[in-house]
Image: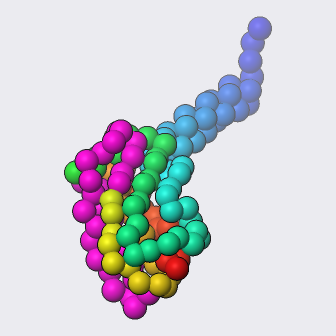
Amino acid sequence: MHLSFRSWAMRLLVLVLLVWTAEFAWAHAVLVESSPAANAAVKGPDIAFNLRFNVRIDGDRSRLWLLSPDGNTAPLPIEKQPSPDRLQAHASGLKAGTYKLQWHVLASDGHMSKGEIPFTVN
């Protein structure tokens, strides 16, 4: 069976696209679960944060910050990782209002990802 140049070119294009999209899909850490969840209302003043990602996270090179209702940003120390795909932290003395937990994480493949989780303290 002889394939035409066009047929070979199409097959090559499909192969390149498959490889490229697979590489892109694995290139970044994706937050798959968090506590508190996005837009959740929680009881303060002390909050435990638990984040789970789709890949292993380098906890030593990852960072968490808490953006408070008054606009101030404070770093949150990351606790010892309970598993390679999780980060944990605690915040104390939070007053009622809307906060954002901001995260920058380094995935095991060397790519940085970032995001935020808005939540409200009652």
Q: How many marks?
A: 0
Q: Nearer the viewer, residue 88 or 28?
A: 88
Q: Residue at x 49, y 77 (%)?
A: 121
Task: Please name whichever residue, 44 or 59, is drawn nearer the observer in this view of the structure.
Answer: 44
Q: Is residue 34 magenta-colored?
A: no
Please name the residue shown 50% across and 56% down the image: 34
Which x, y percent locates residue 39? Answer: 59, 70
Q: Horizontally, is 79 left or right of 51 in the view?
A: left
Residue 1 visible in image: yes
Residue 100, image quadrant: bottom left
Name above or below for residue 72 compared with residue 3.
below
Q: Is residue 119 visible to the viewer in this orientation of the structure?
A: no
Indicate left or right for 116 with 59 as reference.
Answer: right
Magenta stretch: give its range: 61-88
Q: Residue placed at 57% from the left, 72% from the top? A: 41
Nearer to the camera, 77 or 20: 77
Give the residue furthest to the top. Answer: 1
Q: Is residue 68 magenta?
A: yes
Q: Residue furthest left?
A: 60
Return the x and y of residue 66 as percentages of the image width and height: 36, 74
Residue 108, image x, y percentages: 34, 41
**Percent of width and height locating residue 115:** 46, 64
Q: Indicate whether 19 appears above or below 96.
A: above
